[in-house]
Image: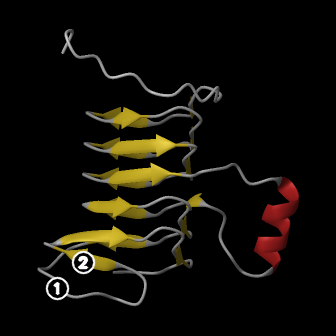
Amino acid sequence: NQNAPIFTHARFLPPTRLDGVKVNSSLISDGCVIGEGAVIENSVIGLRCKIGKNVRISNSILMGADFYQCADELATEQSEGLPPIGIGDGSVLDGVIVDKNCRIGRKVEVVNTRPLAGDDTSVVVQDGIIVVPKGTTLKDGWKS
């Protein structure tokens, strides 16, 4: 509305980098790195999201990250078996809300294919929508 504009806080982040990505009816915030072959449809991608190669994101909201991980931190976490903050290669997310600073490994499937209720140890299902809480780690190959 021109009579009531909404202003955001300037963050001074680098522009988003897209490499061979298909984006349809989506919003992508500043500071993201999205890998080759990714498909993003009807989704909102938050600040500083790192999305791997051949990832498919549909009808989802990703909140992003509060910070970038440095090389030393990544090496330490990799030796501990933790995926980096972001979405790993080959993962599929559909109808999901992913809160900030989540680690989703490679070839993870977070898709609500049936009417679910209650919660898993890693995710919460509320009104048929899968929510990945802040700081959650889903290791390589995890499936909902």
* Residue farthest toward the top in the current orientation of the protein: 2
Left or right of 105 in this view: 117: left
Residue 115: image quadrant is: bottom left
Residue annotated with mark 2: 125
Q: Are marks 2 and 1 in contact (CB under 8 Å)?
A: yes
Q: Tell me the element at label 1.
A: loop
Nearer to us in this view, 5 or 91:
5
Left or right of 51 in this view: 67: right
Residue annotated with mark 1: 117
Circle 2 packing at 10 Å, graded few (<14), some (14-19), many (20+), is some
Q: Tell me the element at label 2.
A: strand
Report x, y in % for residue 5: 28, 16
Image height of 13 relative to 53, above or below: above
Give the quadrant of the N terminus: top left
Give the quadrant of the C terminus: bottom left
> Which residue type does callout 2 highlight?
Val
> Which residue type does callout 1 highlight?
Ala
Image height of 115 relative to 56, above or below: below
Question: How far is disc 2 from disc 1 in space, using C-alphas?
Answer: 6 Å
Image height of 100 relative to 116, above or below: above
